[in-house]
Amino acid sequence: MTKWVKVFETPNVFKAEILKNELLSHEVAAVVLNKKDRNYLIGWCEVHVPDNQENIAKVIIDIFNQNDPETESTL
């Protein structure tokens, strides 16, 4: 069974979804866990990938962050 690891988190749901789509386009399995409170819209969205694809995901995330200066990885 594959273990999933968090590789990115952001308060912006749309950025998490865009990053997930970018990872999927590079054949890296990815899911978004939305941990935001629906009433107050506070919290974080996390992007998780299988542990065996973590290194390639981090490279893709670094390139993604270079193109969007407002996006910062907290890991």
Image (tube, grey):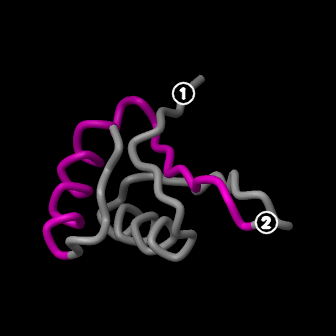
Q: Quadrant of residue 63?
A: bottom left
Q: Nearer the viewer, residue 48 or 45?
A: 45
Residue 36 within the segment the image draws in magenta? no
- Of the residues tagged 2 and 1, which is closer to the observer? 2
Residues marked 2 and 1 touching at CB (< 8 Å)? no
Q: Secondary structure at mark 1?
A: loop
Q: Which residues are magenta?
A: 41-67
How many other residues sit within 10 Å of disc 2, few (<14), some (14-19) or many (≥20)? few
How many other residues sit within 10 Å of disc 1, few (<14), some (14-19) or many (≥20)? few
Q: Is residue 10 above or below residue 3?
A: below
Q: Residue furthest right?
A: 39
Q: Is residue 46 above or below residue 27?
A: above
Please state the horizontal and vertical placement of residue 62, each as a whole percent of the image: 18, 55
- Judge left or right: residue 19 versus residue 2: left
Which amino acid does the dot numbered 1 rest on? Thr
Q: Which residue is mark 2?
A: 40
What distance separates the C-alpha of mark 2 from that of mark 1? 34 Å
Label whose residue precedes the other's in the sequence (2 or 1) = 1
Please state the horizontal and vertical placement of residue 24, each as a whole percent of the image: 41, 64
Please state the horizontal and vertical placement of residue 8, each as a whole percent of the image: 41, 48
Which amino acid does the dot numbered 2 rest on? Tyr
Q: Nearer the viewer, residue 71 or 23?
A: 71
- Judge left or right: residue 73 versus residue 9: left
Rendered residue at 23%/75% (across/down): 68
> Image quadrant for the C terminus?
top left
Please state the horizontal and vertical placement of residue 65, each as a whole percent of the image: 22, 64
Q: Which residue is mark 1?
A: 2
Residue 44 within the segment the image draws in magenta? yes
Total numbered badges shown on the rendered structure: 2
